[in-house]
Amino acid sequence: MIYLLRHQKTYNNLKGIISGQSESTIIEGNINKNQKYMISNINCIYSSPSKRCLDTLRNLTNMRPIIDDRLLERDMGIFEGKKKEEIMQKYPGYFKNKKFSVFMTPPEGEAYDIFYRRIFSFYEELIKDAKEDILICGHNQALKVLKAILQSEEVTQEYWAETNFENGKIIKYNET
């Protein structure tokens, strides 16, 4: 069984600021207590090295995660640290229906194909043939790509706009 967890809500999330690979402090207390029970049989945890992911896991479990840089959020380049509303006004071509156009490369940021290959590499090496229960703590965009890979689903702009991971909520992924 694979469990996916987006880090707890951060102050940047609250303020509508794009974090990307930049750090933002989590807001304590938004992990449901039932989540701890949900992962009581976990054998292994993988996490982004981001402080917001590691802090989320500290609030959830005493297990030490295996840190993997491939789980970092997409590098959003010059958009990082700026309000999404301001970026949408200044760079409207990068957004569609108020959602980032997944296949666009943020200025000085990470191209989608490179980002996808990074997440796919993690899947191929560590998850594809896993026999144990695994928790993966990461970021919204990285988890969207991983979910698509797990489901053998093509990432489209529609998929991107409709798929979101709620902060601090564990999603059980069952391949059956």
Image (spheres, grey):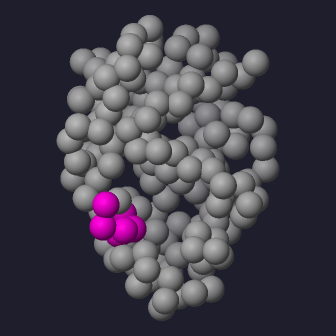
- Would residue 82 be counted in the magenta stretch? no
* Residue located 39% across and 23% down the image: 35
Image coordinates for residue 100, horizontal then vertical, percent: 58, 70
* Residue located 44% across and 8% down the image: 41
When the figure is inspected, residue 110 is found, relative to residue 165, above or below; the finding is: below
Task: Give the prevailing secondary structure in the magenta stretch.
Answer: loop
Q: Is residue 153 visible in the rendered structure shown here?
A: yes
Q: Which residues are magenta?
A: 14-19
* Residue located 78% across and 38% down the image: 152
Q: Quadrant of residue 151?
A: top right
Question: Does residue 148 appear left or right of residue 143 in this picture?
Answer: right
Q: Quadrant of residue 45?
A: top left
- Would residue 17 be counted in the magenta stretch? yes
Q: Split into 4 quadrants, where in the image is the C terminus?
A: top right
* Residue located 61% across and 59% down the image: 114
Image coordinates for residue 52, horizontal then vertical, percent: 29, 46
Image coordinates for residue 104, horizontal then vertical, percent: 63, 74
When the figure is inspected, residue 13 is found, relative to residue 88, above or below; the finding is: above
Question: Does residue 176 appear left or right of residue 73 in this picture?
Answer: right
Question: Which of the pair 137/163 is nearer the observer?
Answer: 163
Q: Is residue 23 visible in the rendered structure shown here?
A: no
Question: Which of the pair 98/117 is nearer the observer?
Answer: 98
Image coordinates for residue 149, horizontal then vertical, percent: 70, 40
